[in-house]
Image: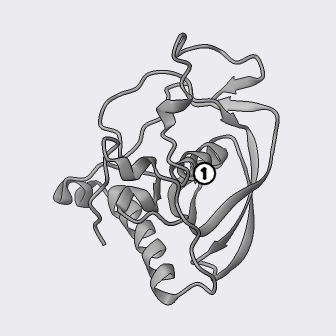
Amino acid sequence: MLFKIVKDNKPSLRQKCVPVEVPYTKEDKEFVLEMVDYLKISQDEQLKEKYKIREGVGLAAPQVGRNIRALAVHYPKYDQNDNVTYVTYALLNPKIVSNSVKKVALSNGEGCLSVDDDHQGYVYRYFKIIVKAFDAIQDKEIFITARGYDAIVLQHELDHLDGILYYDHINKKDPFYKDPSGQLI
């Protein structure tokens, strides 16, 4: 399914999302699975060109017009031998239940499907998080332990559920401030 992406000038993107009602309905599960499909399409060079969409690794429900606590992630992960696996989740009511003190940021900054302008600077996030959520792919409640890049992606999408955009985290006085408790990856 192709969604129209809500841009950062829309007030709805700044609203706190409501929890998805439990028990989860078939429609709610299908919705978050369609978000995963959108990400897969966005990562296919031919389909991305055909539909004129930007590539993404994560998508939160408010970015596609629903202010519910749901998000999807899908991206390749390579091991030291260049073998690829995919990190894929379709999460309902995700919540960070534990986080590290240590911080991490992407050395080349973050981007967002909802943000067309480039906002330069470091976005420091927790290096390690544990997220509790219902995963529509596995059709059960799960705990995800994420570190480094994986933790950054999840926190970026979780922020959307609270009306926060990545550039809100950039130090306004010194966008490339190096946090002593953090590392760049």
Q: Residue 43's quadrant in the figure?
A: bottom left
Residue nearest the viewer, comparing 131 with 78: 131
Identify the residue shown where x is 61% and y is 13%. 177
Q: Name the residue under label 1.
A: 154
In the displayed structure image, the side of residue 142 where residue 162 appears, left or right: left
Instruction: Point out residue 77 in the picture as x, y percentages from the top left corner.
Output: 58, 52
- Image quadrant occupied by the C terminus: top right
Identify the residue shown where x is 72% and y is 76%. 141
Q: Residue 91's quadrant in the figure?
A: bottom right
* Residue 47 in the image: above or below residue 108: below
Identify the residue shown where x is 68% and y is 31%. 104
* Residue 157 in the image: above or below residue 139: above
In the displayed structure image, the side of residue 54 where residue 90 appears, left or right: right
Instruction: Point out residue 89 in the picture as x, y percentages from the top left corner.
Output: 58, 66
Disc 1, SS: helix
Instruction: Point out residue 88 in the picture as x, y percentages from the top left corner.
Output: 56, 64
In the displayed structure image, the side of residue 78 where residue 62 appears, left or right: left
Residue nearest the viewer, comparing 77 with 114: 114
